[in-house]
Each structure stands twice: as C-alpha cells, then as structure tokens.
Image (spheres, rainbow, N blue to C red):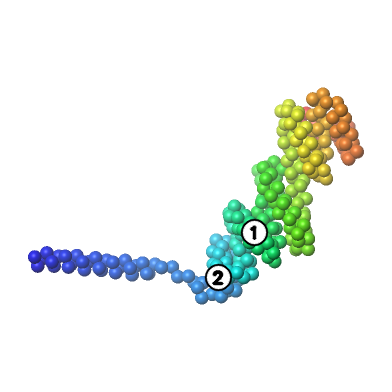
Amino acid sequence: MNLKHSAVRASGLVMSVLMASWLVAGCGTTTKDETSGWSTDKLYSEAKEEAANGNYERAGKLFERLEGRAAGTLLAQQAEIEHAYVLYKTGEKAQALQTLERFLKLHPTSPAADYALYLQGLVNFNDNLGILGSIAKQDLSERDQQASRDAFQSFKQLVDQYPQSRYAEDAQVRMNYITNSLAQYEVHVARYYYRRGAYVAAANRAQQAVQEFQQSPSSEEALFIMMRSYEKLGLVQLHDDAQRVLRQNFPTSPYLTAEGLRSKERSWWQFW
C-alpha cells in the first residue's frame, strides 16, 4: 500500500511540474502589444509612416487599433479612411469598398467624405487598365464595365456634392475617360455582333452608345455601324436617318466617303 500511495504521489508531482512548465511556457510566448503605451497621435504617425514605406500590412493593423482607441473622434474617421486605402493597395478591393461604403453611411457629413468618394472611385477604376496603360493588349473598353460604371457614379457624386474639393478636378478627368471607355465598349460589342452577322443586335448596341454617350468620339463609329447594319437588313429609311445624323455631326467623317472607308477597311475594319 505504501508503495502504491508513493507511486500515486509521485505521479501527481510529475503532473504538477508539467502543468507548471506549460503555464510558464505559455506566459513566455504571450505577445506584448508594443503600442499599448502610445498616444493616438503617435499611433497615427507610425501607421502613416509604415504606409508611406510600403509596409501596408503593418500599417493596416495600426490603423485598426487607432480606430478602436480613438472611437468617436475625427481621428478615428481618418484612420478608417486610411485603412481603406491600405486595403486597396494590398489588393483587398472588396474589403476596401465595404469599408468605404460603411464610412459614407455612418459619416455622410465627415470632412473626409469627399476623399472617401474619390477613393471609392479609384478602387473601382482599375487604373492598371485605365489611364496608366494596358495589360496584355486589353484595354478598359474590352472588359466588363460594371466597375467602371460604379467608379463613374462615385466620381460624379464627388464632383456634384464637393465641386471645390481638391479631388474634384482629377475625378472629372477620370469621368471623361470612363465615359469614352464605356462608349468604346458598346461599339466594341456592336462590332462583334456585326462581324457575326447579328445585324439587329449590332444596330441596337450601336444605338445605345449614341444615346448614352452623345459627346463621345465613339458615337461617330457607332452611327456608322448603325448605318451599315440597317443597310444589311434592308431598312432603307433607318439607314438614311443614321447616315444623315452621321453627316450632320461628323461632316468630315471618313465613313462618308468611299476612299475613307477603304482606308478603314485596310487598317482595322477588316471584317466588313
């Protein structure tokens, strides 16, 4: 019995030592929050510096902490906006848009609302395929246009509500680009339909481009696609109407002369 009790006591002692070791080890691996003693101003400046240096992951964590500590202040609003920018830069576009949408819903009168709209537009704008060039020979007019339309709405809201904003001028430039790209997209699709002999679809898509984007240079080409589609369909009156509008708005259009048309055919209208 004594041996048995001794064995039990020894086993209990071993377990106690192991438990103590685990507790010590656990305490030793606890991560200390180095920002716990920082002021909100220091936290903001450190986050900004990390973002400026391209350390977006760390900057995002610092901005998140600042949002919590400065809750209810303008600094917290600024941190939320900065966090959205960091998410955008790291490719987390969906999260960035969610953050901005929440910000605009909760703080519609914030001094940073104009920047939030501008950033919202930028996230959707996809500048890698926009003003800054093209990738793999594919431009913005050849891609799905929903994001471009969303970007346009954000920029338009910015320009309409905050015309004196420092971001308004750039937003207007991007709006003009998006308008032209959307028009080009409609013409691109109309051209696709025409090439495949779907003349009704081609005419309808070209007409949509003309109606929605009257001031776009692409409306010239759209009118020509309408004219040729109606000709193929034997719709003489509609053909003549499209030709008349084309002549009135673009009197020097190469699409109105046989020589100009042949020139276009040799270059990129090879499907006629």
* Distance of label 2 from label 1 (alpha carbons): 21 Å
- SS for callout 2: helix
Could you tell me residue 156's position as x and y percent? Answer: 75, 54
Kind of residue at disc 2: Arg
Q: Nearer the viewer, mark 2 or mark 1?
A: 1
- SS for callout 1: helix
Please indicate whether residue 39 sits to the left or right of residue 180 in the image. Answer: left
* Residue 153 shows in this picture: yes
Q: How many numbered dots are placed on residues in this image? A: 2
Quarter of image, res 203 = top right
Q: Which residue is mark 2?
A: 69
Residue under the image location 58 percent in, 70 percent down: 70
Kind of residue at disc 1: Lys
Residue under the image location 56 percent in, 75 percent down: 39
Q: Is residue 83 above or below residue 91?
A: below
Q: Earlier in the sequence, mark 2 or mark 1?
A: 2
Residue under the image location 55 percent in, 61 percent down: 57
Of the numbered discs in the image, which one, if any, rests on residue 160?
none
Give whichever of 261, 40 is nearer the camera: 40
Other-residue count near label 2 (Cα within 10 Å), few / some / many at <14 / 14–19 / ≥20: some
Q: Quadrant of the C terminus?
A: top right
Could you tell me residue 191's position as x and y percent? Answer: 74, 34
Q: Which residue is mark 1?
A: 105
